[in-house]
Image (cartoon, grey):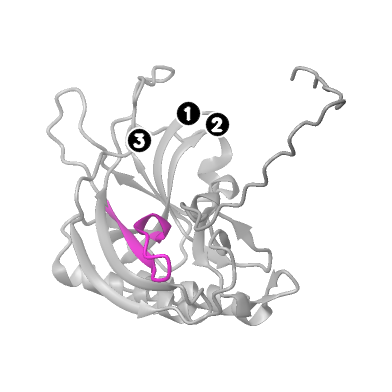
Amino acid sequence: MAVAPWAKVIWKTKDTIISGITWLLYDQVEELLGAPSGGSTEVADFWMRYQYRFSDIVSQDDADDQYVSFDILNHTDGQVDSTWTGSDFTNVHSQLYQALQRIGGQLSGRLTISHVAAYAQAFNAVPPEGAIPNGYSDIVPSGGPSWQLALNSPCTGGSNMAPQVCSTVTEETPARRHWGRIYLPTVGSGAVVNGRLAPTEELLYADAIHDAYLSLMGSDYTPVVVSTRANKGQVVHALQGITGVRTDDVLDVVRRRRFKNALHHTIQPLALAKPGDVDVQMPAA
């Protein structure tokens, strides 16, 4: 069955059990092959994770670069299509890149979109219930990128915000607890009014992602939210179709984006004790 734009669809591995009323949230349920287990010779279906690098051209420290990722499933008539070609990679990239360039006008001028890489992603086999082994990974290690491209698109917003201050785009899915979220790079200082994201930029971010997703969906590339756990830790391997995107004016903080190295240190030495000073003992913590 073909997948319509913004459809309430889920692709799940056959060893994933979705219980209760969750089934009722979806109009369409499709199967996705995970990594083989028990001597099976099946080949896992995979999707692509597009990762865009935003280089900090001021610090020139690779540790200060920021990344934004999108998970995209290629399908034909509702069936997963893992035969990604060169045109598939570039078609998806062109839509995502256009969206990020639109948003880039309101992101920190310290940043430049410098690189994109697409990594193949597939689910591991679901372990027996209650027997998740130590070191278990839901996703098969992808290794190097399946496709990559150097880019050069400077962002042009004001650059006075701390790097960890950003805006987000929420990816709505039928299961409210499993909505996705895109943490955009550092917001441009000119896009902030009274500590909030300005209405113009709020609409711009939502429109840019919405338009890219809609175009992709119309060409059988579905942006998805990856789900790996549900019901207090139960392993659930599924890809949910996105039914809408939303933004708001509340800025967020991504702590891992703080500058990794300080440029200056200021240490005020303690005053030397003078004769007659009282030695005060602090209570133990």
Residue drawn at the location 12% of the way across and 33% of the way down: 41
Percent position (x, y) of residue 26? Answer: 49, 51
| Nearer mark to the viewer, of 3 and 2 | 3
Say the numbered circle drawn on residue 231. Answer: 2
Residue sitting nearer the eye, 190 or 207: 190
Q: Residues within 10 Å of mark 1 (few under 14, many from 20)?
A: some
> Is there CB contact under 8 Å for labels 3 and 2?
no
Magenta stretch prevailing secondary structure: strand
Q: Which residues are magenta?
A: 47-69
Query: Residue at 73% across / 35% down in the picture?
Result: 272
Residue 56 shown in magenta: yes
In this view, 91 is above or below 43 = below
Q: Counting residues from the N terminus, which is met first, the one under dot 1 or under dot 3?
A: 3
Identify the element where label 2 is drawn: loop
Q: Residue at x 80, y 22 (%)?
A: 282
* Residue on which the image places disc 3: 138
| Quadrant in which the N terminus appears | bottom left
Q: Is residue 28 left or right of residue 50?
A: right
* Residue 139 at x, y percent in the picture: 32, 39
Residue carrying label 1:
234
Q: Nearer the viewer, residue 18 or 197?
A: 197
Q: Is residue 35 left or right of residue 225?
A: left
Q: What residue appears at the point 87 percent right and 25 percent down from the top-left corner?
A: 276
Q: CA distance from mark 1 to mark 3?
A: 12 Å
Q: Describe the element under mark 1 as helix, strand or loop.
A: strand
Residues under numbered marks 2 and 1 in contact, where contact means CB atoms less than 8 Å apart: yes
